[in-house]
């Protein structure tokens, strides 16, 4: 087997947190990928990246949640689940502690997601066009 | 000079496509907005995390009056036959990407194979859109 420096295993765990944050990943899963015991992994991870693995995974999820609050009109509960967190209560607490605002208040400080969406003019033109109606059509459809 | 920003694929079902593009391919949601003023038109875009300024719009096939039934059927027919669109992705390690995506349930139509331009594999999204996944061969400078 080829030699791999220990940090390579830690990086594998970090990459997993970045790539699969939306799954119910835990620090145990990250430790398993790194091939280390949980306690040893947490120490090594913190030494290598300056942050505890739990904190790294959580902030990755919160970063994605903040992006989804800004760029989508999905509910807070839906966003919580879609970044891999199960409890809306804990999500709201962590989010508020990190960003200084609740998810709803955070969203309210930005223009609506539709402003960011840049729905192109061709779509607006086609989807926004009303159906043509005339009085004659109404008369033709009525029973004689 | 202009830059490529967003391109579009037709999809049968936006929710199914969203799951595939995010959960299986690992792309990020860039926008997901439903606009009541446009008859609940849903603008849904995704993109690879490594390219924040590039996105794919996952577009539902509209009904009348935007698209009449005949044309909508033609689009669905082209999709079912695999002629509606294609995306060409590149990767540094096609074998690793192939195994990772296959592990997440992506059904490959072609495993990685040597080509003159590199090694590439092929798969489809749930709507039948074709994807190539290529590890481009590095050409030594002349």
Image (cartoon, coloured by chain):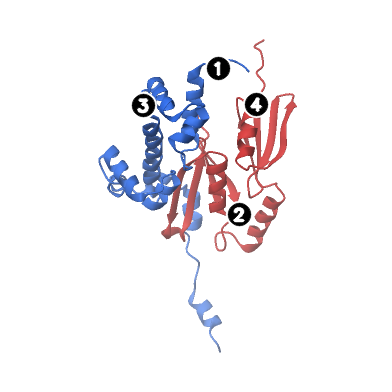
Chain colours: A blue, B red
Q: Are marks 3 and 2 in contact (CB under 8 Å)?
A: no
| Residue at screen point 43% across, 48% down | A81
Label 3 in the same subunit as label 2? no
In the picture of the structure, the residue carrying the numbered disc 4 is B135
Left or right: A54 with respect to B115?
Answer: left
Say what secondary structure mark 3 lies in.
loop
- Which residue corresponds to mark 1? A4
The chain letter for the residue carrying disc 4 is: B
Q: In the displayed structure, would residue A125 be above or below residue A141?
A: above
Write down the chain letter for disc 1: A
Q: Which residue is mark 2?
A: B12
* Element assignment for label 2: loop
The tag on residue A51 is 3
Per the model, the C-alpha gap separating discs 4 and 2 is: 29 Å
Q: Are marks 3 and 4 in contact (CB under 8 Å)?
A: no
Give the image location of residue A6, x and y in percent.
49, 18
Of circles 1 and 4, the one toward us is: 1
Considering depth in this image, is B70 or A116 the residue closer to the camera?
A: A116
Query: How far across and how far down the image is residue B86, in percent?
Result: 65, 41
Label 1 in the same subunit as label 4: no
Residue most toward the top?
A: B142
């Amino acid at each position: 087997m080829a030699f791999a420096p220990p940090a390579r295993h830690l990086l594998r765990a970090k990459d997993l947190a970045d790539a699969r944050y939306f799954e119910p990943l835990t620090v145990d899963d990250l430790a398993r990928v790194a091939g280390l015991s949980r306690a040893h992994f947490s120490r090594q991870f913190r030494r290598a990246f300056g942050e505890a693995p739990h904190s790294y995974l959580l902030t990755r999820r919160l970063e994605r949640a903040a992006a989804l609050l800004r760029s989508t009109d999905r509910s807070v509960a839906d966003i919580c689940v879609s970044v891999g967190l199960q409890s809306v209560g804990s999500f709201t607490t962590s989010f508020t502690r990190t960003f200084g605002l609740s998810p709803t208040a955070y969203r309210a400080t930005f223009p609506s997601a539709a402003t960011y969406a840049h729905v192109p003019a061709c779509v607006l033109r086609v989807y926004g066009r009303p159906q043509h109606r005339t009085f004659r059509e109404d008369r033709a459809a009525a029973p004689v | 000079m202009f830059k490529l920003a967003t391109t579009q694929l037709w999809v049968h079902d936006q929710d199914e496509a969203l799951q595939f593009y995010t959960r299986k391919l690992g792309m990020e949601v860039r926008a997901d907005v439903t606009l009541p003023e446009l008859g609940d038109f849903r603008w849904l875009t995704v993109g690879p995390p490594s390219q924040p300024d590039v996105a794919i719009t996952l577009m539902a096939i509209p009904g009348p009056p935007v698209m009449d039934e005949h044309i909508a059927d033609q689009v669905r027919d082209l999709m079912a036959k695999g002629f509606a669109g294609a995306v060409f992705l590149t990767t540094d390690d096609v074998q690793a990407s192939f195994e990772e995506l296959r592990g997440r349930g992506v059904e490959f139509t072609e495993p990685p194979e040597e080509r003159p331009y590199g090694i590439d594999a092929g798969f489809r999204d749930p709507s039948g859109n074709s994807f190539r996944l290529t590890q481009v061969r590095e050409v030594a400078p002349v």
